Structure formats: C-alpha cells, structure tokens
Image (tube, rainbow, N blue to C red):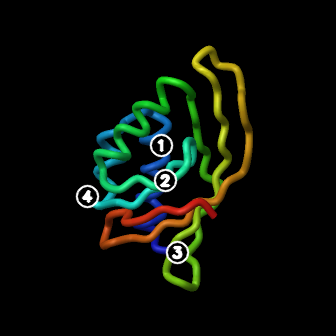
C-alpha cells in the first residue's frame, strides 16, 4: 500500500467526519464520479458531491472509522470502514461495516464505488 494514498484516504475520512467539505473535495478530481449511497445513483463532479453532502448532513450525521486500507490487484484501493449514522438528535440509526473502492488520477480520487 502506498503510504501516500493511505494517508490521503485517512485524511479524507477525517475531514468528512469533521464536516470540512472543502478539504474533502480538494482530494477529489474535478470530475469525480461518486456514489449517492443515501438516495441512489451517482454524482458527477465536485459541485454535485458538495450539494449531496450538504443535503445529507441536514438530515443525518454519518461518521466513518477506517478499519483497513489495502491495494487491490486491479490497481484500485479498498477502504474498510465502520459506519455509524445518527439523526440530528444523536440517536443511532445504523451501525455497519462497509467497503469503499477508490480509483485515483494522480493524487486525486477519480471514482469511488461501494464494495
């Protein structure tokens, strides 16, 4: 595993948990292809991802804890994370383990899929 990519992904998750949207989006390619895991479908570009997360964070409070990050034989990188979703009052709505698979364009995330 490239320590740079692992560090980049860990930073991405920390920025997401901190709701530092500018930092998360800066780690993505301008034309990033991102899953809409909450409503379904895919998002294209940083603006769509921004709007999605702003909308999502008004309704739910997801937090992710990285369990592992590994290089896959096809050149993608898989992050296994613990997801905890709360409502605005703090009540836990969901706890699960999820897999996120990343493709990179240089230092930027080009595409993420739910594994």
Residue at mark 1 to residue at mark 2: CA–CA distance: 6 Å
| Marks 1 and 4 close (CB-CB < 8 Å) | no
Residue placed under numbered mark 2 in the picture: 10
Q: Quadrant of residue 51?
A: top left
Q: Estimate the spatial distance between the alpha carbons at disc 3 and disc 1, rounded to whole Å.
A: 19 Å
SS assignment at label 4: strand
The residue most toward the bottom is: 73
Q: Earlier in the sequence, mark 1 or mark 4?
A: 1
Q: Earlier in the sequence, mark 3 or mark 2?
A: 3
Q: Earlier in the sequence, mark 3 or mark 1?
A: 3
Residue 77 horizontal/vertical position (percent): 52, 71
Q: Nearer the viewer, mark 4 or mark 3?
A: 4
Instruction: Find residue 111 and report its horizontal and vertical position in percent.
Output: 42, 65
Q: Earlier in the sequence, mark 4 or mark 3?
A: 3
Q: What residue is shown at x 33% (from left), y 64% (from top)? A: 108
Disc 1/disc 4 C-alpha distance (Å): 20 Å
Is disc 2 placed on a helix, strand or loop?
helix
Residue denoted by label 1: 14
Query: In the figure, is residue 38 to the left or right of 6?
Result: right
Query: Dot 4, how many residues are within 10 Å of its Cα: few (below 14), some (14-19), or many (20+)?
Result: some
The residue to which callout 3 is attached is: 1
Residue at 49% over, 53% down: 10
Which residue carries the number 4 mark? 30
Mark 1 near mark 2, Cβ–Cβ under 8 Å? Answer: yes
Q: Position of residue 106 (x, y in %)?
A: 30, 72
Disc 4 versus disc 3: distance between alpha carbons? 24 Å
Residue drawn at 72 percent across, 51 percent down: 97
């Amino acid at each position: 595993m490239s320590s740079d990519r692992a560090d980049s992904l860990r930073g991405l998750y920390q920025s997401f948990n901190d709701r530092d949207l500018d930092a998360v989006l800066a780690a993505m390619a301008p034309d990033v292809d991102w899953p809409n895991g909450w409503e379904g479908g895919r998002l294209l570009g940083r603006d769509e991802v921004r709007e999605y997360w702003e909308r999502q964070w008004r309704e739910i409070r997801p937090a992710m804890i990285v369990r592992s990050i590994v290089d896959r034989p096809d050149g993608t990188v898989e992050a296994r994370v613990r997801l905890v979703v709360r409502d605005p009052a703090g009540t836990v709505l969901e706890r699960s383990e999820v897999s996120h698979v990343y493709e990179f364009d240089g230092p930027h995330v080009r595409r993420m899929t739910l594994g």
